[in-house]
Amino acid sequence: MDKIGSKYRTPSEGDEQSGDTQLTYRRSRRRRVTPYRFQPDAFYPDEHPEIPTIRRASLQLNAQHTEKASQQQGKKPALSNHTHNHRQRSSLKDHLQSLSHSRALLIVGTLVILILTPIMITSAVFNSHPSSTSRASNQGTPASTSRTSNRGTPAKGTAVPVNQRPADPHQIVIIPSDTDHPPPPVFAQSAYLLDADTGVTLYAYNPFKHIPMLSTTKLMTAVIALEIGNPAQKITITNAIANDVNQLSPDSSLFGVKKGETYTLSDLLYGLLLPSGNDDGVVIADSLSGNIKNFVAKMNQKALQLGMYDTHYMNPHGLLQPGHYSSAHDLAVIGRYSMSIPLIHHITGTRVYHLPPGKHPDRILINGNQFLWWYPGVDGGKPGWDAGSNFLQVISCTRNHHHLIGVVMHSNNFWTDMRDLLNWGFDDFTWISPHDVDFQHPIVYDSDSNYFASDRKENTIPTADKGRYYIYTGFSISGPIMAFFDRGGGLKKFGYPISPPSLSSTQVSSQRFQHATIHCSLTTKQCTTT
């Protein structure tokens, strides 16, 4: 059992599995890949998620691209109107001077000017600025696409593809769905929670930090594949394709294609998204675009259309490469977009897939997304792993017709991070643990995580105010209340916190626990219980 610092190494996702995955889920031993060390990227740090701010500097999912375009297009007409009005006022002035000998005409002309001037000014302002109604609509409601396709183009509610970068691409409005629990802290370097039904951002932590996105890359690969290809089209592994596949590292995660074999594009997408076959990414790119470079260009173009301004692709599989990165916000965007495509949503939500024999061997494919095997409502997504201690996840989860997209990037305890985010997003903290579920039915690659033995109710996460967040109930304690809690017997005496702290008009801070309520005077520093 390996350790990273003082923490157990978390389970490997689909990225590290090579060859045919067996139903026994046998753990394979392979040499560790030395991750490429990227230079620190400049990013826009968000406020700490423990502080429940409504508005934070982030990136708007439903970007105000239409508004910005309208403003830019409106500048020239505004200038034209201004010039025209200037000429009109000059000619009127000359005319009035010529008629100055007539007092009646002068009075009438002056009244006409007084009436027309406000109208002309109002018209100029209206032409040079979009309406406030349009702006509010762009900010609050996701636009819909009018495109339809039997290959699964996005349904209504997805962001409008645009080609122009907005003036400020790093600004969003965060609207928490759960107001009686604090936003959970995370072990991850960045995290995001998105309401897939409305496009509203629920949670954002370091949402624009540039981080290698590893095999979550394959969500975009699948999107482009279905835009330019047909699921039923047959693809044969040619000599040229086989040569490109052979350039992959021997310990790369592979589906296992061989020269001369023939697959449908749908078969290759299962191999791409379930066992996370890097070779399938190469095959798809070469066969649909002629070469990897052309295919990756389409990936980057699509990223810009979706407003993923902190993403850049260098390959179709996600292996570490300089210039290949994304952000938590952008992964939420592609997560929402890809899950709106029925075939991708279906494939990533499939636990086990049997590929019958044809012009290729018979195969059993296992989905390496562990959340699909234990967390209620998970119906798709894609994990990633860097062969070290850093894990990524894009998770699609639906409960009671409420669809959320969760993202964690570079977490050494990804199941705690993602569970806390989804619990908070659904406002449901009913305890569910992979350790308990694993006793009921095996979770894939559970041995790589020591069977989740470290996942316990009493686990906590440090908070920004030097407090503790209890994952069991979703509440934090800190300050004098935490000090009194620790001195007085902790969990054994008081139980878990079941409410946030409240402050009375007499400067007494109170917080309810399972077995008592702690009251601490901020003036006298004395605490009591009831």
Image (tube, grey):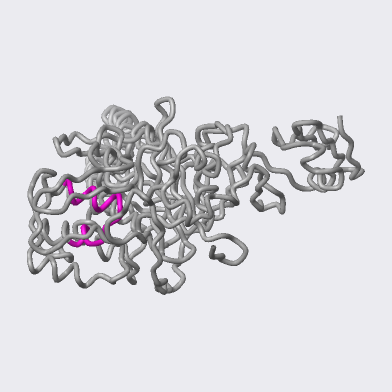
Question: Any magenta on residue 468?
Answer: no
Figure check: 49 above or below 512: below
**Residue lying farthest to the top in this orientation:** 400
Question: Any magenta on residue 267?
Answer: yes
Residue 58 location, x and y as percent? 46, 50
Q: Quadrant of residue 13?
A: bottom left
| Residue 244 in view (yes/no) | yes
**Residue lying farthest to the front in this orientation:** 24
Residue 413 location, x and y as percent? 54, 54
> Left or right: where does residue 119 sit relative to residue 393?
left
Position of the N terminus by quadrant: bottom right
| Residue 98 in view (yes/no) | no
Please state which of residues 294 and 53 is positioned toward the viewer in this rendering: 294
Q: How many marks?
A: 0
Q: Residue at x 51, y 55 (%)?
A: 449
> Left or right: where does residue 132 sit relative to residue 359?
right
Residue 346 location, x and y as percent? 27, 38
Q: Residue at x 82, y 47 (%)?
A: 486
Figure check: 158 above or below 6: above
Position of the C terminus by quadrant: top right
- Which residues, given as a range, are shown in magenta? 266-282
